[in-house]
Image (spheres, rainbow, N blue to C red):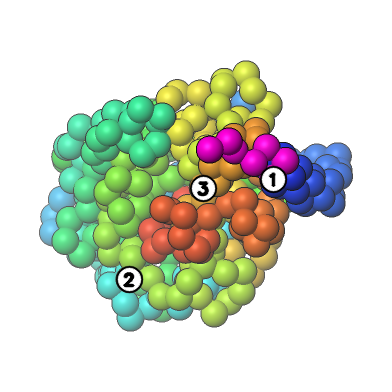
Amino acid sequence: MRPNTQATQAMMAALIGMFMLIWMTEPAAAQSRHILFMKSAVENPALTEATLPLFEGRKEGRTVWYVVTESSNQRDAARRGVNFSPKLANAKGTPAVQKVTVVGGLVQFLATVDFSPVHSVTPGPTGFPPAAANPGSVGEAGYTPLIELPDGTVLNAPHLANDTGEHDKIVSINFIQRRVTLRETEGRYAHKPTHYISFDVSDPGVAALEGSTYAPTLAASPGVGRDDITSSRSPIAPIANGQRGADNSQRQGLSSAIMGEGDPLNVVQVIPASAGYSPLWDAFLSFWTQSAVDLGINFLQGDFYQIARQADAGLITGPGGGAWGAIGVVINCPIVSADK
């Protein structure tokens, strides 16, 4: 039986036309300026590393080292030089937040992290999904990076070191000067680069891909990712199967990142300048359809709403061809800076 060549060509033309209409209606990129949201951070010139103040705490007499990246209290956030995230207060009273005490100026944590596992990711045939993935650090029972201080303020205070080892994102750490340098990941917001640090993830496989701590309690953070103040989460869209090639200007995606071509260039919906910002990102895992891949129209996406339109047009789906939306994986990756 001969294929219906005319019907196939018509379908391809319609897909290309629909995609180009979406593509051409995107706003033109304006001249960029770099904005450092986390004032306590110092980035390197290449914007691949950030140095933060390091804090000492305790867990049942053990020394714990951590950083602070967000506060739910605006005055406290300004004093610390960290991101203001009022949405974190929505997680109080859930397992996603551990209530702590402060003794002698040191936070007394209820749980910490085991940094002794060996981090490993083995690429699959096309990169993603990986053939194997093991996180390099695992939270103890009850560990979460979110802590509630005695005054009710919620901080994002991910653990970076203790007597079991150090976090995989650490480039260098100075316990005397109390500074730590961490690897940043490049993403996209409104078609511009943004830079964040991945600390913790509620799923072990994704934690391995992010080089982060597996912290299942983050899944208890309430709500679904959205750009408003009703949820404790904000949306992020990782592209699974974007174009490949380290020198390809349209390169993007988890497959590309796993194959060592660069950062995945995940797309966030909101940045710290908005009250809707949270460092707890709800993953909207996004797959180009096979038709879009075959036609070569799986171009680099730089805006969350653009991806939503691609999904509405039937060019992007969720896992397994399902509906596009949050998959329930929560990633703690505070934004340090962005271009605007």
Q: Where is residue 196 in the image (x, y as percent from the top left)?
A: 53, 44
Residue shown at 29%/28% (left/top)?
122
Residue 223's image quarter?
A: bottom left
Callout 1: SS: helix
What is the span of residues highlighted in magenta in the rendered image? 1-7
Q: Mark 2, mark 3: which one is toward the viewer?
A: 3
Q: State which tag comes first along the sequence, 2 or 1.
A: 1
How far is the residue under mark 2 from the one under mark 1? Answer: 49 Å
Amino acid at circle 1: Ala
Q: Mark 3, mark 1: which one is toward the viewer?
A: 1
How far is the residue under mark 3 from the one under mark 1? Answer: 25 Å
- Which mark is on residue 7? 1
How far is the residue under mark 2 from the one under mark 3? Answer: 26 Å
Residue shown at 34%/63% (left/top)?
218
Q: Looking at the picture, tell me which residue is in the foreground, 49 or 22.
A: 22
Residue shown at 67%/58% (left/top)?
313
Q: Where is residue 129 in the image (x, y as percent from the top left)?
A: 36, 39
